Amino acid sequence: MNRVIVAPVPPEDGMRAAMARVWEIYDASFAEMQVVLRERLSTHPAFGPLIRDTPVDEAQEAVNRALLRAAMVDWEWEAYWQDTRRQAAGYATAEIPLASWVELVNLFREDMVTRVFAAAAAPDVQELVHAVNRWLDDAIAAFAQAFVSANEGVIASQQQAIRQLSTPVLQLRSGLLILPVVGALDRDRLDQMRALLLEAVRERRARAVVLDVTGVPEIDTVAANQLIGSVDSARMMGA
Amino acid sequence: MNRVIVAPVPPEDGMRAAMARVWEIYDASFAEMQVVLRERLSTHPAFGPLIRDTPVDEAQEAVNRALLRAAMVDWEWEAYWQDTRRQAAGYATAEIPLASWVELVNLFREDMVTRVFAAAAAPDVQELVHAVNRWLDDAIAAFAQAFVSANEGVIASQQQAIRQLSTPVLQLRSGLLILPVVGALDRDRLDQMRALLLEAVRERRARAVVLDVTGVPEIDTVAANQLIGSVDSARMMGA
């Protein structure tokens, strides 16, 4: 999970005038667009049930709109993306797949582009289309990345749980420990085994430790050396 | 992991003429667009190293182009999306975050829209912009969904591994088994414990089984009943 999360980068300042104009067009037809979108989505397999069960939340809509205005007019993009990420993380465990969210953005994009063409003429309209696309692509990027990162967080904590579960230290009788090792040995597991072993030797005052590696498919020299090192350390602690 | 994967749905037939025209524009400037894109990406933090280390693979490019032509002209979208998904699944474990892929599509989209404006006049250009956006949004949907699904597959198999690791059956001495149960009991784990218990009773000819539930934070009546049911079944098998 070494991935660097690259947040979207705010558009160049050269796009500010076009983006502010896109905001005006959006703001002027906000109510109408909401109705059209809700109507189109009400028969959608993924969004239909959600739309039908969720009444319009005007307070939430006002918050969203203020965030969007701050981004598109005042160029404060980070708060808007942060809110988008927060929503995406919440949706990552819900029933709606990411592909459907992108489809939703496409419906909205088509509506916005149509309104932009109705509101402006060439050559302005081209700049406005770029602004619409930049706005929506950055929103998709923030949303989709947060969606994926929520899953990556689950993967990392599960890995940790598996590593702990697969390295138990059993006490056979007083002073005798057994460490059954099952599965492949990577560096993280070797480090963890060493820590577990020494902790167990100290806490349970072990005199003997059996490292049972019959369950390990193959041991290379690096792993073997590290195992021997762990045994030496245990010996120095009295085992 | 109950999510239904909604593949993109091919565009309405009404978009065929516009999409074929977009293909022509793309095809005519293919070589030029590749150069521009590679140049813009060569300084990108995520794509730069990849671009610099990867020579142009003309055979692969020809395959990609044929798939795209079949989609945009012959309306065979599924093969193109399938290939997109395949690539996405391969990239899901690489260092490039999903947000950067969306950013890449935006660069490409801007270039395509600019070329569309140069090649056509109103009112045609509006239809062409819709076609470009539909093409690229569906591609993002297929790519992002496959990216997420690759992670979901990992999560599901890790869950399975954790469940198995956290339900060991230990043999204390001949005929005596112990099943230490640690952590919350959900329906899947209860079912699995029952199966493990009966299998262990049969294979190891156990006469007595200790179900150690001191490690379970809370047991509701449903779980308790199911545990008792498992014990009854074990009894019928001779334990």
Image (cartoon, coloured by chain):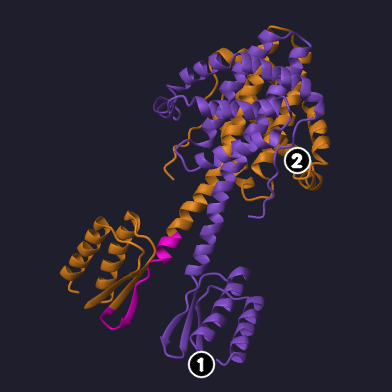
Chain colours: A orange, B purple
Above or below: residue B179 compared with residue B122: below
Q: Residues within 10 Å of mark 1 (few under 14, many from 20)?
A: some
Residue type at mark 2 is: Asp
Res B207 label: 1
**Magenta span has B180?**
no
Q: Secondary structure at mark 2?
A: loop
Does residue A68 appear anywhere in the picture?
no
The residue that label 2 is drawn on is: A57
Q: Position of residue B201 (x, y in %)?
A: 53, 85
Q: Residue at 59% of width from left, 87% of height from top?
A: B234
- In this rendered view, identify the residue nearer to me: A235 or A146: A235
Q: Residue at 54% of width from left, 36% of height from top?
A: B98
Question: Which quadrant holds the N terminus of chain B?
Answer: bottom right
Q: Nearer the viewer, mark 2 or mark 1?
A: 1
Give the magenta range: A161-176
Residue type at mark 1 is: Arg
Q: Position of residue A177 (x, y in %)?
A: 29, 77
Above or below: residue B79 compared with residue B56: below
- In this rendered view, identify the residue nearer to me: A52 or B43: B43
Q: Residue at 75% of width from left, 45% of height from top?
A: A46
Does residue A190 appear anywhere in the picture?
yes
**Magenta span has A163?**
yes
Residue A173 lies in what quarter of the image?
Answer: bottom left
Residue A44 lies in what quarter of the image?
Answer: top right
Q: Are marks 2 and 1 in contact (CB under 8 Å)?
A: no
Q: Residue at 75% of width from left, 19% of height from top?
A: B18
